[in-house]
Image (spheres, rainbow, N blue to C red):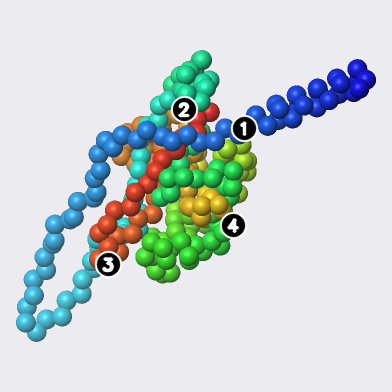
Amino acid sequence: MSKFNKLFLLSTLLVVFLSATVLAVEPFGANVTNISSTRAPADAPTSAEAIAGNVTELNVTGFTITQSWQGYFGNVSGTIMLADNNDNVMYNWSLASPEGEIYASTNNSISWSTIKCLENEFGDHFEGLEAMFGIEWDDVDGVNETFSVDGSHENGGGLIHDLFYTNNIEFTAGQCASTHVFTANQRAEASTFQEVLLYDTTTYSVIFTSILDEESPLGFDGRAHDFEMLVLENGHLTDTSTTTYYFWVELE
């Protein structure tokens, strides 16, 4: 074999070896600490006098807690690290204000290389997903009333999600169904608390995705949070069982 051919073969093998060891940076499992869990208190009833023979017109206002959604919120801390497969750290970089994504799914094993927008699998109205969680087509707190591609849901105001990456897969601005969870003034705002619906086509898993792209804005309760997220949970009729969610984080 000529010297040129030997060098060519060596270069080819080196390129193949290097190519085989280049991996996408997929999300890591997150360590979650449960701080507290609360819900809105029931209002005390008011009264109206009844007199035999009378008919009385009433205007009644009130609220009912959703039977379809659980909310998560909080702060994110962590590092970007250089380490081997035994978690021996060669170097790390602390993140004072993390950017990236928080992921939650009922499946604890996600194939991050086969992630797509959820509506690509369920359609724009999400009927199949709603049925899985006991949601009727006309429920006002359904999935398509909460998430949309063009921000046309009830609290959307035309708001769409920003560009983001999952496992080196690019999702352009507004590509997936999204929502904006409320800020301190109890409304959705363009740059804060963006949430996107993703889907793993290998394990058939829905992935709720919170985008971290603003430094600790004031959340729904008037306190600073890195993220706010809605996840589905069936509390309809006699269903009182809980749903387990697993969390991942991808920091930038």
Asked whether disc 3 touches disc 2, contact meaning CB atoms under 8 Å apart, the reply is no
Pointer 1 residue: 23
Q: Position of residue 61 (x, y in %)?
A: 25, 63
The crowd level at tag 3 (other Cα within 10 Å; few <14, some 14-19, many 20+) is few
Q: Position of residue 57 (x, y in %)?
A: 20, 74
Q: For the residue labelled by badge 1, is the local secondary structure a helix, a strand or a loop?
A: loop
Q: Position of residue 212 (x, y in %)?
A: 48, 35
User: How far apart are the alpha carbons under marks 4 and 3?
Assistant: 30 Å
Which quarter of the rendered picture does the N terminus lie within?
top right
Q: For the residue labelled by badge 2, is the local secondary structure a helix, a strand or a loop?
A: loop
Asked whether disc 4 touches disc 1, contact meaning CB atoms under 8 Å apart, the reply is no
Pointer 3 residue: 237
Give amino acid for label 2: Pro
Give amino acid for label 4: Asn
Give amino acid for label 3: Leu
The crowd level at tag 1 (other Cα within 10 Å; few <14, some 14-19, many 20+) is few
